[in-house]
Image: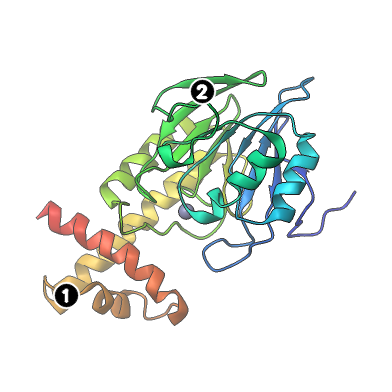
Amino acid sequence: MTLTHPAYGQLRQVTPTAAVLLADNPGQMTLDGTNTWILRAPGRSDCVVVDPGPKDKAHSAKIAEVTGGEIALTLITHRHHDHTGGIDHLVKMTGTPVRAKDTGFLRGSDAPPLVDGEVIEAAGLRLTVVATPGHTGDSTSFLLDDAVLTGDTILGSGTTVLDSSDGTLADYLASLDRLVEIGAGKALLPAHGPDHPDLAPVARYYITHRQERLDQVREALRVLGPKASAMAVVRRVYADVDKRLWLAARSSVQAQLEYLRAEG
Ligand SMILES: [Zn+2]
């Protein structure tokens, strides 16, 4: 079977255990849409779902269909709606328990919040919970034997925007270092955009990109003065970027300014 790209509504096998179902919610922040990951150990009928995706009954129904409803556990990478909006439809259709760092997304009677370093055994799989804050405070990655599910911490294309409400650049850079460390030789399974065979070079590229942006912001502050607003910095640093992306860029620049101002 040949899959068109983007392959909405079609389950695409990526690694021996991981398959992806792309939600039909394309946009500037979601790229082609949200990737719902379905993890199944060889020979098992039950599975683990990572990110139910947006509030979209058709997408939830598709997840229920391709899993046969046998979802041992659903995991959440972070709080944003395009990852969590579909929780309640999926729970209603399949009864899956749901675990997340944020207690507001827990479903099922025995579903404690995720803890950094915890090893989860479900549906014949072993996943290690890796706290990777920065995109948001609750951003979590999941480590498998041969792959890492990175949520929005590392995307399949483009770069990650930091949520100014609780995403910090200091956290984010530390998370990228951690992903370089654990990701060597493991597939990158992001929440948006295409997968990659090796996470480490992508994580290293992200670090380089952030350092370059920091240098540009430092340079802008030398010209605009140390108290320049985030938007003034955006107009200078992102002059060559589509203006529709400036609001999102402001959020990242805000995080960069906080990082640089904390550095002193
Ligand atoms: Zn997000």
Q: Label 2 amino acid?
A: Asp
Image coords of residue 145 (percent x, y): 58, 24
Q: Could you say where residue 168 lies in the image, as x and y percent from the top left? A: 28, 51
Q: Which residue is mark 2?
A: 110
Q: Is residue 72 left or right of residue 180?
A: right
Image marks 2 and 1: residues in contact by CB distance under 8 Å: no
Is any atom of residue 208 visible in this view?
Answer: yes
Q: Residue at position x 83%, y 54% from top?
A: 3
**Snapshot colouring:** rainbow
Measured in 3D between alpha carbons, the distance from the residue under mark 2 to the one under mark 1, in whole angstroms, is: 49 Å
Residue depth check, mark 2 versus mark 1: number of the one nearer the observer: 2
Res 255 quadrant in image? bottom left
Considering the image in quadrants, where does the C terminus appear?
Answer: bottom left
Q: Is residue 221 above or below residue 173?
A: below
| Amino acid bearing label 1 | Ala
164 and 199: which one is in front? Answer: 164
SS type, badge 1: loop
- Decide which of 14, 152 is in the foreground and name it: 152
Question: Residue 195, can we see it?
Answer: no
At horizontal 36% and vertical 43% (from top left) the residue drawn is 133
Tell me which corner region of the image, top left, top right, bottom left or bottom right, holds residue 138: top left
Q: Mark 1 sits on what residue? A: 228
Rendered image quadrant of residue 42? top right
Sooner in the amino-acid sequence: mark 2 or mark 1: 2
Q: Residue 193 placed where, x, y %?
A: 61, 55
Whole-percent x and y of residue 209?
A: 39, 57
Q: How many numbered dots are placed on residues in this image?
A: 2
